[in-house]
Image (cartoon, grey):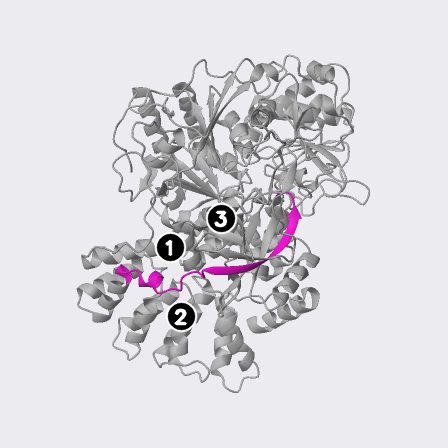
Amino acid sequence: MSYYSDYLEEIEVRKKDLGLNPKPIDSAELLSEIIAQIKDTGNEHREASLNFFIYNTLPGTTPAAVVKAAFLKDIALGKETVAEISPESALEQLSHMKGGPSVEALLDIALSDDAQAKAAGEVLKSQVFLYEADTARLADAYKAGNAIAKDILESYSKAEFFTKLDDIPEKIKVVTYIAAEGDISTDLLSPGNQSHSRADRELHGLCMISPQAQQEIVELGKQHPDAKVMMIAEKGTMGVGSSRMSGVNNVALWAGEKTSPYIPFINNRPVVAGTNGIAPIFLTTVGVTGGIGLDLKNWVKKTDANGEVVRDENGDPVLEEAYSVATGTVLTIDTKAKKLYNGDQELVDVADAFTPQKVEFMKAGGSYAVTFGKKLQTFAAETLGVEAPAVYAPSKEISIEGQGLTAVEKIFNRNAVGVTSKTPLHSGSDVRVKVNIVGSQDTTGPMTCQELEAMAASTISPSVDGAFQSGCHTASVWDNKAKANTPKLMAFMNAFGVITARDPKGVYHSMTDVIHKVLNDITVDDRAIIIGGDSHTRMSKGIAFGADSGTVAIALATGESAMPIPESVKVTFKGSMKPHMDFRDIVHATQAQMLKKFGGENVFQGRVIEVQIGTLLADQAFTFTDWTAEMKAKASICISTDETLIKSLELAKSRIQIMIDKGMDNAAGMLQGLIDLADKRIAEVKSGEAPALAPDDNAKYYAELVVDLDAIDEPMIADPDVNNEDISKRYTHDVIRPASYYDGRKVDLGFIGSCMVHKGDMQIIAAMLRNLEKKGPITFNAPLVVAPPTYNIVDELKAEGDWEVLSKYAGFTFDDEHPKEKARTQYENILYLERPGCNLCMGNQEKAAPGDTVLATSTRLFQGRVVEDSSEKKGESLLGSTPMVVLSTILGRFPTLEEYKEAVDGINLTSFVPPSQDLSVAHTAIPAVRL
């Protein structure tokens, strides 16, 4: 069988079983066979082969793109003749291939003596994805007196690849589509259990919302051909939860614009909106595609005659509709006035969606082109020895004399690149920053690879200190989907220069450690900036931003990222933590006390939470920073004492050394480099040269919250509130209730795992079992699934004896020699010791039984994530602390407070003693210190 014959068989299966078009080609072998059939003018498959070659081959640096670019180059140079592809058409197709082999081919032609050299030069003027090898060729040719090279560089220095693009329309007509009421999680747009198909965009598009919704969107488009369908989260926020580029890709696939006639199923420029705007991570992803994200504000808090907010019986503000966006409503976005209209009626100001930088993304078709364009313009101007004209909107630089800096402002100032201000910048400033640590996870990783190929990147930026590709999201089940996707992903990332959880060469044992735990370990500077392909990239050292796969790709390729300096909310603590409380309860209580203090307004949303943890090691502190994703915060920063920071860095060093000992370091010595950086930082802190990061005492915050530890007397549960009559208030993470609310309620399954837990949680399980066995045999009345975060923790537990206790009560223990190949669909009332990884928290491989009431330590309580609904009952995932989950599964129900206190008596739970004084430092007016 030939590659082409296999492809035809695959086409038939896709068409028959799924109703899909032929899968886009990325195989060099297949495309080579297709080219042979094109050259054979009598071949029966020639017409189809031409169509596949021209319209169904993936661009960038895919193996197929290399073959396609070479053949198009030969056609352009007249070395090959294809009646249907003229030399001019060949150049046009090369112009759509987005860099890498296509740019190499265009440079070969442009810098030659061929008749097509000038035409190729004109095409190159439109390209932005050039790397050092490409720009070096141009510079060398210019210095050698090549006129075309000079012409190209002059065009680049003026950024004509950007200025000659069409401006965005002054008026954009949209027709509304309410995708759901309440917060819309990215799981609705790109379900986790379909993560295996994300790289196959047409196939993955079938999982967005529902087939009915997809058809309704198509019909709206047909009814309003002059309008774009705007997908809306009515009475909620659009795109909460995981950072999924695939979610925006799906929206663009159904309601966006085709990127290129030669690039299949890759659309851009979608329009999305929410009553409460767009989640920060999702908004970044919208910018990657050149899309528009609107904050509608179409529901507002109702007030009485005295101007007081009217509240319902639960104390929540009553909302009233300011204007309607019912499905099928035709509206107009005025991009110049930056307002939304219904006919002549002004509805809302949308200026935040049309900042100069966002408009550039829209004009360029995405943020990548702007990022690379700026670099290319700078290179060309420097090569020519001229001053680059101001083409792009200048970065907004805000510096307020006499005002101190928050911790986030200090980190951004330290890592800022290309800033003109001589004084420190404050929040609201737009900056480009160096990225120190980058993480890619395994369900979005295949898309990151695609993005890297599309932008023609071939190796990691040398300025990145550390990068890790995880295998945690597909750790539960080593099924055919994982076997097909994971090895390919690991091989690509390993070759790119990233430390990978699995070794393509098979030297070290496969690691399925939770990505966030590894990133937390390899972050060795409290002033670092971390970008990770998951919304829970929330390190307790430095500042970390969860991001889409595209932003991760940019960070890997360039070592930089662009974003405004966010506002901060300051969180401190008072009082004492009661001995029967776990730190997870403090985290939940923080959210509850915040909502109470600010009258239901979530002041954390879209901002950085600066929390003065002080004495809690990075491992335990991560429980707080991780949950800030559920608080809808943009990021978080832990302010620690010098002593605590040093201990955290020493722990990080020891775990990095274990990775090195396992053989995980790469040829560049990335892991050893991280240990060296940790040693340097420890020395700075010990010497007093650069103490632990702390904000200035006169820094300005959006809000401040003091959490009262004395007021927290019982475990706190985050509730999806699945039966709330107001649909918009379900699955928000904002309903926090004391455990007594649930006294006696049946628990069908317990789960301890995910990035929210640490080694101490595993020790708590063992300690509780020891406590309870003193009273007699222990019987589980509900299944308890335990997934340790990392193999390091498992090894440490084995060495210290706690793993033996867990194993004693386990009815199932993971076996790496014989990993599960099928998802578990039924659970017995036993303890399951699962392989390190995300497990039930992700919900892409295994779930609880439909309709179950689950009590878990995980992060997400979205509908269908951990448990789906049954025909009789809604599934619900209640979130609580490790000791609460353990006891509830043994009892088969929620315990009384007395039962709980007795079960944890004498156990050292994850306790927390707040700093004795505010950790802010005296402000000193000094010039900005930047890299």
Magenta segment boundaries in residue numbering: 156-183
**C-beta proximity under 8 Å, tags 2 and 3:** no
State the image coordinates of residue 447 (x, y, percent, origin top left). 51, 53
Q: Residue furthest right?
A: 872
Q: Classify 578 as above or below 44.
A: above
The residue that appears at 72% across and 40% down in the rendered structure is 848
Q: Classify 706 as above or below 546.
A: above
The residue labelled by disc 2 is: 94
Seen from the viewer's position, the closer of residues 125 and 602 is 602
Q: Earlier in the sequence, mark 1 or mark 2?
A: 2
Query: SS at mark 2?
Result: helix
Residue 173 part of the magenta-drawn span = yes
Q: Find the distance from the CA under tag 1 to the CA under tag 2.
A: 20 Å
Seen from the viewer's position, the closer of residues 412 and 352 is 352
Q: Is residue 491 visible?
A: no
In the image, taking residue 294 as reference, residue 382 lies left or right, namely left
Query: SS at mark 1?
Result: helix
In the picture, the disc for residue 370 is 1
